[in-house]
Image (cartoon, rainbow, N blue to C red):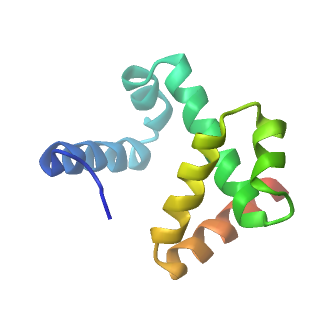
Amino acid sequence: MYISRNLDQWNAFLAMLQTAFEQGKAQDFLTLLLTADERDAVGLRLQIVSQLLDKNLSQREIQQNLSTSAATITRGSNMIKTMDPNFIEWVKQHLDDVEKN
């Protein structure tokens, strides 16, 4: 699985992100690093993953509902296929928990 061109930078980001979450600074940290458009894109990706895992809609219906490109939906679908099934179950569980609240 492709993670990053520079694994050291990616790991440094993940460590800092974990620290930010542990200290209640995650929103500030991500706001510092991401533009409004990037934050929106991350939110869209989460919606795409959620709808793909829900399996109630076709990729075309998801694309239309979320007003995004077919390539973005396909990218999400392809990434899901490469991930460990146990991790995907974890994601589903937590997405379900988020949607209930």
User: Which residue is drawn at the image coordinates 68% and 71% (left, top)?
Assistant: 93
- Rendered location of residue 82, percent (x, y): 45, 69
- Rendered location of residue 34, percent (x, y): 43, 24
Out of 89 and 17, give the one closest to the viewer.
89
Out of 16 and 74, give the one closest to the viewer.
74
Q: Is residue 28 above or below residue 11?
A: above
Quadrant in which the N terminus is drawn: bottom left
Residue 70 figure quarter: top right
- In the picture as drawn, the residue positioned furthest to the bottom comes out as 86
User: Which residue is drawn at the image coordinates 68% and 48% (left, top)?
Assistant: 48
How many numbered circles does the render carry? 0
Q: Is residue 31 above or below residue 100?
A: above
Q: Is residue 89 above or below residue 4?
A: below
Image position of 47 (left or right of 89): right
User: Which residue is drawn at the image coordinates 74% and 63% (left, top)?
Assistant: 97
User: Which residue is drawn at the image coordinates 49% and 60% (left, top)?
Assistant: 79
Out of 70 and 97, give the one closest to the viewer.
70
Image position of 6 (left or right of 62): left
Out of 54 and 39, give the one closest to the viewer.
54
Image position of 51 (left or right of 19): right
Residue 37 figure quarter: top right
- In the picture as drawn, the residue positioned furthest to the top comes out as 36
- Rendered location of residue 50, percent (x, y): 71, 56
- Rendered location of residue 62, percent (x, y): 79, 47
Image position of 4 (left or right of 21): left
